[in-house]
Image: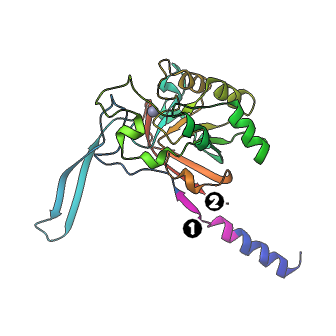
Amino acid sequence: MRPVGFLLCVTLFASSAHAADAKKLIDMTYPFAEDTLHWPTAKPFHLEKTSEGRTAAGYWYSAYEYSGAEHVGTHLDAPFHFAEGKWTTDQIPLARTIGPGVIIDVRSAVGADRDHRLNLQDIRAWEKRFGRIPKESIVLMYSGWGKYWGNRKQYFGTDEPGDVANLHFPGFSQEAAEFLIKQRGVKAVGVDTPSIDHGPSRDFIVHQILGGANVPIFENVAALDRLPAKGATIFAIPMKIKGGSGAPLRIFAQLP
Ligand SMILES: [Zn+2]
């Protein structure tokens, strides 16, 4: 190899190895705060400002305590959430929550039916335009629900505390979940809504199927409007709660 070519290779390698380009990073996480939306029966996120202010020695000091459900805001559902004996939060390998993103846009279907379930037709339509879903992808439903974030009535279909009888929002269908596991070998699946099972679900069958196959789930994922249909890399990093059924999640994408 000629020295100039070698130098070029070294330079390219060095730049890609340090490729934390702010313009290419998309944060897909809602902030955790008292008003962060959570499942109607779960405890909200709470931050207690136990110490805050100037100390006697003159320096600033702040340290807080927090509490809340595992399933609050942008979060992970561990397979163990709905599948006995499957991975708890801490057991999920990092390699299973980092991978190529496949964003399936169902906004038009959701416009006609707010309980729409992403189905085989939606998957086929995506594959017709963008090619076969690659093995080990992270498949995310883009319903446009993010525009309702912060408005509990719009986002869940009900704002009655504890009301789980009148939930209305989109999710995945059983057939789609089975197809993605068996035919496409996906790593993880996520939604920009409160749950991978649509609002009216009573048996949470998609949670059961994905969990049973040790496929992690991401819920209340933000900023899907900023991602391409394919080509981004998804990084979903849950808090490592030992024995957890889920966890708050920091999820972000790196654009191509
Ligand atoms: Zn959950």
As rendered, which of 89 and 219 lies closer to the eye? 219
**Mark nearer the N terminus (2 vs 1):** 1
Note whether 233 is above or below 157 in the view shown: below
Left or right side of 190 for 100: right
Q: Residue at horizontal 47%, vertical 28%?
A: 199
Image spot of residue 165 (x, y percent) = 38, 22
Q: Where is residue 189, by image quadrant?
A: top right
Label pair 2/1, CB-CB below 8 angstroms = yes
Q: Which mark is residue 255?
A: 2
Quadrant of the displayed image that contains ligand 1: top left
- Disc 2 crowd rating (10 Å Cα; few below 14, some 14-19, many 20+) is some
Residues in magenta? 14-26
Q: Residue at horizontal 59%, vertical 27%?
A: 210
Note whether 23 is above or below 234 in the view shown: below
3D distance between C-alphas at marks 2 and 1: 8 Å
Check the image and name the residue furthest to the bottom.
4
Image spot of residue 76 (x, y percent) = 48, 38
- Disc 1 crowd rating (10 Å Cα; few below 14, some 14-19, many 20+) is few
Judge whether residue 142 is colored magenta: no
- Is residue 151 visible to us here? yes
Where the N terminus falls, by quadrant? Answer: bottom right
Figure colour scheme: rainbow
Judge whether residue 21 is colored magenta: yes
Q: Amino acid at mark 1?
A: Lys
Left or right side of 33 for 124: right
Q: Residue at horizontal 65%, vertical 37%?
A: 187
Q: In the image, is the residue at mark 1 within 8 Å of ligand 1 by its beta carbon? A: no
Q: In the image, is the residue at mark 2 within 8 Å of ligand 1 by its beta carbon? A: no
Local SS, label 2: loop
Q: Residue at horizontal 55%, vertical 40%?
A: 111
Where the C terminus falls, by quadrant? Answer: bottom right
Q: Which mark is residue 23?
A: 1
